[in-house]
Structure formats: C-alpha cells, structure tokens
Image (cartoon, rainbow, N blue to C red):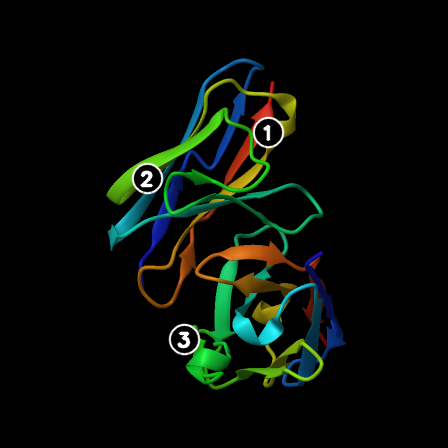
Amino acid sequence: EVKLVESGGGLVQPGGSLRLSCATSGFTFTDYYMSWVRQPPGKALEWLGFIRNKANGYTTEYSASVKGRFTISRDNSQSILYLQMNTLRAEDSATYYCARDKGLFDYWGQGTTLTVSS
Amino acid sequence: QIVLTQSPAIMSASPGEKVTITCSASSSVSYMHWFQQKPGTSPKLWIYSTSNLASGVPARFSGSGSGTSYSLTISRMEAEDAATYYCQQRSSYPWTFGGGTKLEIK
C-alpha cells in the first residue's frame, strides 16, 4: 500500500525557517518524481516544485513564487522527501502536501499545516 | 504561466441532474488532469490526461476537451459527488491548478 505522511508543520514567525518531511512507503521511492503542493485556507492548490527520480539525476524544478526560498530534497535511503522553507512570509501559511509524481499526482499525503504569524 | 479559469466557481445540482464544469486555459495545453477534494481531506486524482478515469472513479464521470477548453461532466449527480474539483495542467512550468469549482448537492 502506498503511503505518504507529511510532518513538521507548525507556527513560525515571519522571516523564520522550517523543514517539512514526507515519509513514504509502499513503492520504490527512487523510481518516482516527488512534488510539493500547498493550499492556503479556503483557497486553491498551488504546485511548488518537484524533485526528479534517480534516472533523471534527482534534479529539481520550482515555481517562481518559492524559487530561492524553498528547497526540495530527498533521502533515498529512508524514502523521505523534504521541503526546506526559508524567509517565511504570512502568505506561506497553508496546508502543505507531498505527492507522488509519475506524470500525474496519483498519491497524496494528508497534509501538514504551516502558520506564519508573529 | 498558464492560467486556468474554472467555471462556475460554485454550483449546486439535484440528484440525477447532469453537471458540467469547465476549465479554460490561457494558452493551449496538451491535456488536463482533474482532482476531487472533499473538506478536510487531501485531493484525489479523478480524471487524468483529459478523459481517463482514475481508479475507482464512477463511470458517470467523464472528461473531454482540447487546446484551451476542457470540461468534466457528471452524467447524473449523486450526493457523494459533492466536492471541490480542480483542473491542472502540466504542459508547461509552472504546473498550475484552476481556482476550483465547488459542487454542492441540492
């Protein structure tokens, strides 16, 4: 059974940093691209970026809205995806989802919530 | 970036009624994916590559379209179909989602 479990959300002050994790199981992690998607309260989904699979060198792509502030990485030995978020702003407050990516987001985690506020 | 505009933003339908949700792209895209999301839950892949139903999706759902115009149709509305539906394009970076259509049951 494919599982994705996000963690690491919480309350952070503006300008702060946080790292989210997405623990995965039930599939060969290195075979898949992995994406992060967020959803502000009551708003639409926003794709943030992805990290490619082993065959494509684990390189990354980002949305302009987070490029330079957010970094996606992966620990392939433990099948964990990460999202390092720096210089956080109020508008980064959202539920953050990881998604398995095989050309489409076929499995999603349950999400972890970030609130950026003083 | 490609902007996806969904219409309507909110709608309600009676059981048995036909429902159509549209997604208009600001530039031509090769195909469209659709996701269903119910309150408090994560999105689920619903229709992929414009017209293919994801596993477990009832046959009353269908998808169609090309270029800049795509749609999701429910042939006969059922209570369990009440949800928010999002379209998504992956033809060019950044991948973008539509603003969502909230579908309610009358």
Q: Are marks 3 and 2 on the same chain?
A: no
Q: How far, Cα to Cα, is label 3 from label 1?
A: 34 Å
Q: Amino acid at mark 3?
A: Ala
Q: Amino acid at mark 2?
A: Tyr
Q: How far, Cα to Cα, is label 3 from label 2?
A: 26 Å
Q: Position of residue B55 (x, y in %)?
A: 56, 41
- Chain hosting mark 3: A
Q: Residue at x 61, y 30 (%)?
A: B82
**Number of residue marks:** 3
Snapshot quadrant of residue A41:
bottom right
Of residue B31 and residue A20, the one placed in the foreground of this image is B31
- Dot 2 alpha-carbon crowd within 10 angstroms: few under 14, some 14 to 19, many 20 or more: many
Q: Which mark is residue B70?
A: 2
Q: Which mark is residue A64?
A: 3
Of residue A23 and residue A88, the one placed in the foreground of this image is A23
Q: Position of residue A22 (x, y in %)?
A: 69, 71
Along the horizontal axis of the image, is A12 left or right of B44?
Answer: right
- Secondary structure under the numbered disc 2 in the rendered image: strand
- Chain hosting mark 2: B
Q: Which residue is tagged 1?
A: B81
Image quarter of the C terminus of chain B: top right
Camera-nearest label, 3 or 1: 1
Of residue A57 and residue B43, the one placed in the foreground of this image is A57
Q: Mark 1 vs mark 2: which is more N-terminal?
A: 2
- Chain hosting mark 1: B
Q: Are marks 3 and 1 on the same chain?
A: no
Image quarter of the N terminus of chain B: bottom left
- Secondary structure under the numbered disc 1 in the rendered image: helix
Snapshot quadrant of residue A20:
bottom right
